[in-house]
Image: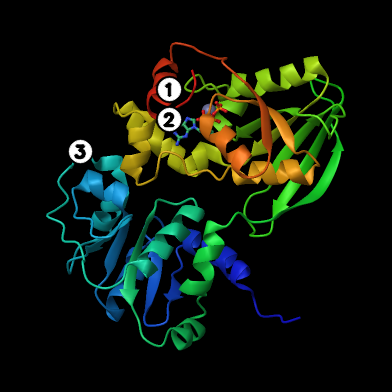
């Protein structure tokens, strides 16, 4: 066994580097860039980056739409950063918080030439670091030497990209009896993914028969709704309602996936809430930030169910994507059990948007 880090380990390291404001080196067969997350960029590092070449700002096509920048590649946009533009200007392209106050950032010139693949990987890395989806890039030569002499993480495009698209294997870490209000016969299981990302949980109620469809819920973490009792969404009542139903029936499994804010993280969700305060709906807010409507990986849920020995569920949800994902990953949905709870005057529009734009059966 080698002590050299594997690609999975390098990806985990790169996520932390980007969050800390440290650049990473990304290479493919023909070229290489130094990439730094715009959210954690400092003036000092921007000056350093500029000594190496002219920076390019990578944004998602979603964000480019708001900025009215030309998109020449499917999903991303590479904006040429003119000389002398300060850090604040670069960050205002990535962060929509002052879009209303100063909507005109341009004219913006997008890069058309060259392959977008390194920029795409940089964007994917900022998403997986739960930062704003944007990176500043400069082209460099001799990537291996550059990374080694500066102590930077080096990512290889061909070997890392497939890993980012895959769902990481999960392993059970610990489990213990946990009596809860809904049922004294509760048991909490912790699962840890191999990619160093967040752990996910399963709350098993009673002793469900592994040969029958189990009453199940795939719940995504919502700190504001689950913990604080936010009225802006329906998550808290859905969590409590699902557990209560499992308690009444005597058996069930609630999967608690740490995919806060539909996978964009709590900080970005609060950025989305701030845009919602300006009048945008939940989908529009995600798009203005540069995210897709939903960035979650539901495959983790079926992986946990299989690990626990289940192959069929009665799924508590209003989200058809969850049902489709279960079926496509080998967990049969024997019954769709609607979970319509928690409507209040503050989340009326939120629920209406889910029905209109996200296909929820409400
Ligand atoms: N980005 C974003 N995430 C939100 C918002 N409101 C709630 N969330 C997150 O959305 C997730 C819950 O997803 P929902 O779409 O409400 O419901 P669902 O889980 O897809 O579907 P159901 O099974 O029917 O409840 C949680 O991770 C919440 O943190 C919002 O306005 N913006
Ligand atoms: Zn919520």
Q: Is residue 227 above or below residue 193?
A: above
User: Of tags 2 and 3, which is closer to the observer?
Assistant: 2
The percent coordinates of residue 200 (x first, y second) are: 68, 44
User: Which residue is at 42% across, 15% downward?
Assistant: 348
Position of the N terminus by quadrant: bottom right
Label 3 or label 1, whichever comes before in sequence order: 3
Evaluate if marks 2 and 3 touch, with contact meaning CB atoms under 8 Å apart: no
Left or right side of 343 for 169: right
Residue at position x 26%, y 55% in the image: 88
Identify the image quadrant of residue 235.
top right
x, y percent for residue 18: 47, 62
Mark number for residue 101? 3
Q: Looking at this view, is 41 or 72 the one in front?
A: 72
Nearest to N terminus: mark 2 or mark 3: 3
Is 150 left or right of 188, judged from the image as shown? left
Q: Mark 1: which secondary structure?
A: helix
Label 3 packing within 10 angstroms: few (<14), some (14-19), many (20+)? few
What residue is drawn where x is 48% and y is 11%? 344
The quadrant where residue 251 appears? top right
Q: CA distance from mark 2 to mark 3?
A: 29 Å
Label 2 CB, ligand 1: below 8 Å?
A: yes
Label 1 and label 2: CA atoms lie apart by 6 Å
Question: SS class of the residue under badge 3?
Answer: loop
- Verify CB contact (< 8 Å) between mark 1 and mark 2: yes
The residue carrying mark 1 is 355
Residue on which the image places disc 2? 358
Q: Nearer the viewer, residue 337 or 221?
A: 337
Look at the numbered disc 3 and say if its residue's Cβ is closer than 8 Å to ligand 1. Answer: no
- Indicate the quadrant where residue 108 lies: bottom left
Percent x, y for residue 301? 66, 41
């Amino acid at each position: 066994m080698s002590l050299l880090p594997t690609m999975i380990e390098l990806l985990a390291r790169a996520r932390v580097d980007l969050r800390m404001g440290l650049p990473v080196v990304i290479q493919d067969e023909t070229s290489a860039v130094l990439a730094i997350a715009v959210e954690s960029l400092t003036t000092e590092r921007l000056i350093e980056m500029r000594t190496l070449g002219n920076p390019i700002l990578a944004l998602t096509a979603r964000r480019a739409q708001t900025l009215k920048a030309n998109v020449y590649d499917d999903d991303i946009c590479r904006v040429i950063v003119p000389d002398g533009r300060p850090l604040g200007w670069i960050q205002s392209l990535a962060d929509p918080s002052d879009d209303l106050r100063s909507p005109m950032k341009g004219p913006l010139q997008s890069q058309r030439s060259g392959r977008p693949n390194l920029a795409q990987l940089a964007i994917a890395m900022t998403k997986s670091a739960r930062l704003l989806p944007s990176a500043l890039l400069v082209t460099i030569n001799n990537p291996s030497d550059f990374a080694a002499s500066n102590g930077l993480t080096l990512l290889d495009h061909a070997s890392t990209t497939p890993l980012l698209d895959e769902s990481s294997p999960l392993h059970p870490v610990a489990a213990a009896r946990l009596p809860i209000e809904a049922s004294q016969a509760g048991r909490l299981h912790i699962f840890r993914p191999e990619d160093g990302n967040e752990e996910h949980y399963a709350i098993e109620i009673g002793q469900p028969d592994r040969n029958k469809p189990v009453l199940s819920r795939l719940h995504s973490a919502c700190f504001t709704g689950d913990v604080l009792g936010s009225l802006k969404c329906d998550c808290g009542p859905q969590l409590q309602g699902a557990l209560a139903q499992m308690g009444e029936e005597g058996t069930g499994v609630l999967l608690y996936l740490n995919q806060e804010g539909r996978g964009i993280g709590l900080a970005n969700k609060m950025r989305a809430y701030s845009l919602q305060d300006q009048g945008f709906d939940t989908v529009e807010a995600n798009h203005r930030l540069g995210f897709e409507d939903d960035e979650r990986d539901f495959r983790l849920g079926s992986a946990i169910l299989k690990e626990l020995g289940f192959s069929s569920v009665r799924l508590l949800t209003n989200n058809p994507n969850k049902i489709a994902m279960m079926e496509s990953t080998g967990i049969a949905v024997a019954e769709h059990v609607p979970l319509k709870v928690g409507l209040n005057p503050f989340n009326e529009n939120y629920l209406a948007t889910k029905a209109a734009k996200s296909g929820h059966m409400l």
